[in-house]
Image: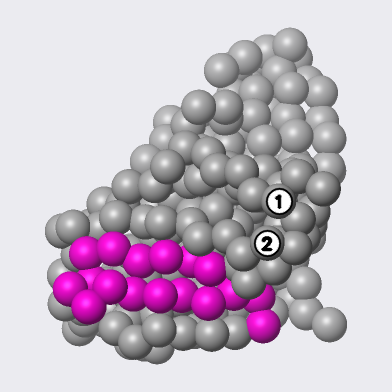
Amino acid sequence: DAEITQSPRHKITETGRQVTLACHQTWNHNNMFWYRQDLGHGLRLIHYSYGVQDTNKGEVSDGYSVSRSNTEDLPLTLESAASSQTSVYFCASSESGQWTSGNPEDDTQYFGPGTRLTVL
Amino acid sequence: DAKTTQPNSMESNEEEPVHLPCNHSTISGTDYIHWYRQLPSQGPEYVIHGLTSNVNNRMASLAIAEDRKSSTLILHRATLRDAAVYYCILRDYYGGSQGNLIFGKGTKLSVKP
């Protein structure tokens, strides 16, 4: 069965270190997204991609970067981890491309299990 | 995309129906209404969506007001596994709109045995 996975599931790092969170999907979806979730803020969009070589900034992109070299993966990199980046990170994917097909089913997002990151 | 308003929390008893309301008074004619839910320690999952007519699937029903300014997600028989945060989200598909799902704070549903 197709799925979306994230690794690691838990990560503890120190302030200033570079950290990369992996996201891999086998749905062959065009769109991939990274969100962070903090108490009191709900889910906030960090970066997203509509296809290979395409990346876009979301609501809270400062301090984060992504690259899309293939359809299946969208790694999220924290260039220099800060305590404010302690959070739970979710990756998601959906079928539709940069412009929605007009079919809501194509826009359904499938989420990974999350990565809990602690920056000390 | 237009904004939605949901109660912060609701309680239900197991095996009873649950009606989760969502207000979206500024909804446009081309906005679809989507519901997602997030079980504890998991990522969100799709529940249902609709445009104008009421919708049913294996998970829930979606009742949409005639003026589309509000909608209600209906869980016909709540189970303990339905305890989650439920998000009501509007998405515009007219003309192939570009954009992403915007999650609010949702409604936290507690289910008592």
Q: Is residue B61 magenta?
A: yes
Q: Are marks 2 and 1 in contact (CB under 8 Å)?
A: yes
Q: What residue lies at 41% left-to-right and 56% top-to-bottom?
A: B21
Residue B93 in picture, x, y percent from top left: 28, 78
What residue is disc 2 on?
B16
Q: What residue lies at 25% left-to-right and 58% top-to-bottom?
A: B24
What residue is disc 1 on?
B13
> Is A120 left, or right, of B7 in this rendering?
right
Magenta range is: B58-74
User: Does residue A53 appear anywhere in the picture?
Assistant: no
Q: Quadrant of the N terminus of chain B?
A: bottom left
Answer above or below: position of A22 versus A26: above
Residue A54 in picture, x, y percent from top left: 44, 64
Q: What residue lies at 83% left-to-right and 43% top-to-bottom?
A: A8
> Is A68 left, or right, of B77 in this rendering?
left
Amino acid type, residue under disc 2 in the picture? Glu
Answer above or below: position of A42 versus A56: above
Q: Is residue B89 magenta?
A: no
10 Å crowding of disc 2: few (<14), some (14-19), many (20+): few
Residue B30 in picture, x, y percent from top left: 21, 78
Residue A68 in picture, x, y percent from top left: 57, 62
Question: Label 1 lies in what chain?
Answer: B
Picture quadrant of residue B2 = bottom left
Amino acid type, residue under disc 1 in the picture? Asn
